[in-house]
Amino acid sequence: MSMTAQLQAKGISVTLGRRQVLQGVDFTASAGRVTAIVGPNGSGKTTLLRAMTGEVAHQGQVTLNGKATATMQPWQLAAIRAVQPQSSIIAFPFTVLEIVRLGLSAGLSAADSAVPMQALDAVGLAGFAGRMYQDLSGGEQQRVQLARVITQVWEPVVDATPRWLILDEPVASLDIGHQFTVMDLARNYAARGGGVVAVCMTSTSPPCLPTRWS
Ligand SMILES: Nc1ncnc2c1ncn2[C@@H]1O[C@H](COP(=O)(O)OP(=O)(O)OP(=O)(O)O)[C@@H](O)[C@H]1O
Ligand SMILES: [Mg+2]
């Protein structure tokens, strides 16, 4: 796989407070497959993801599709990769559709796009568009966030350039049926040429087993 279709990190070190959480971590993910970051609680999975997405200060180099992310503008990054954090706190009363539509402004899609509704359908939330986000269950809220993220990078390949889904424990609070929905969605995105990086705990729910992801 060529360097230009990879997410690569080299020598990532992160210190949080007085703790060195990561020391010289290398990571490579290739578009066209789902790559899982697996490890127990506190092992640094989220920290590695946040270093690679530029949300936490770090040493080391990160390249996305062959370009150093440190040299890219936020809008350039937002056009090619969407990030689902481990938890999202929404402080204001938004409807489900309003939250999913936030993905449109972050990516490059038209404001009148049908994508948000298709994304809700893809995560098993058809019919939820008008509901208040705060009134949903934890697993439903997590799937709304995934819908927002896939809305941002809906087409896995644009101008022969892969786009990326970067997901922190996307199935952690989902029932088994929806775990498979999300896993299939991730696998399908990769099969169509996109890149997927997903953090999983070791407490192996089936989607976290590497064989399920391949
Ligand atoms: N702001 C901080 N200050 C000090 N230590 C921190 C801070 N944030 C995280 N840590 C520590 O860094 C380590 C890695 O945390 P991280 O969130 O990356 O783990 P994780 O692998 O994602 O765990 P989990 O499976 O629970 O999500 C943990 O030991 C955590 O306590
Ligand atoms: Mg974590």
Image (spheres, helix red, strand yellow):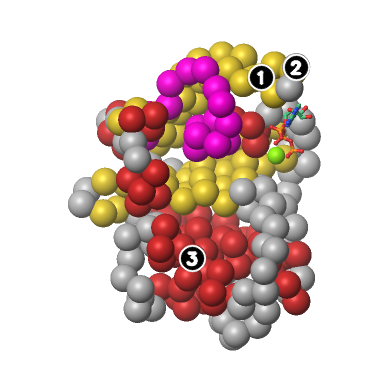
| 53 inside magenta stretch | yes
Q: Which residue is mark 2?
A: 18
Mark 3: amino acid:
Leu
**Crowding near pointer 3: few (<14 within 10 Å), some, many (20+)?**
some
In the displayed structure image, the side of residue 68 where residue 207 appears, left or right: right
Q: Is residue 22 magenta?
A: no
Along the line of sight, which residue is nearer the eye, 139 or 57?
Answer: 57
Residue under label 1: 15
Amino acid type shown at disc 2: Arg
Q: Is residue 22 left or right of residue 10?
A: right
Labels 2 and 1 touching (C-beta < 8 A):
yes
Residue type marked 1: Thr
Looking at the image, do the residues carrying marks 2 and 3 touch, with CB atoms under 8 Å apart? no
Q: Judge whether residue 125 can be spotted in this image.
A: no
Name the spot of residue 19 as percent of width and height, x first.
74, 18
Q: Is residue 23 above or below residue 43?
A: above
> Residue 104 location in percent, x, y?
41, 65
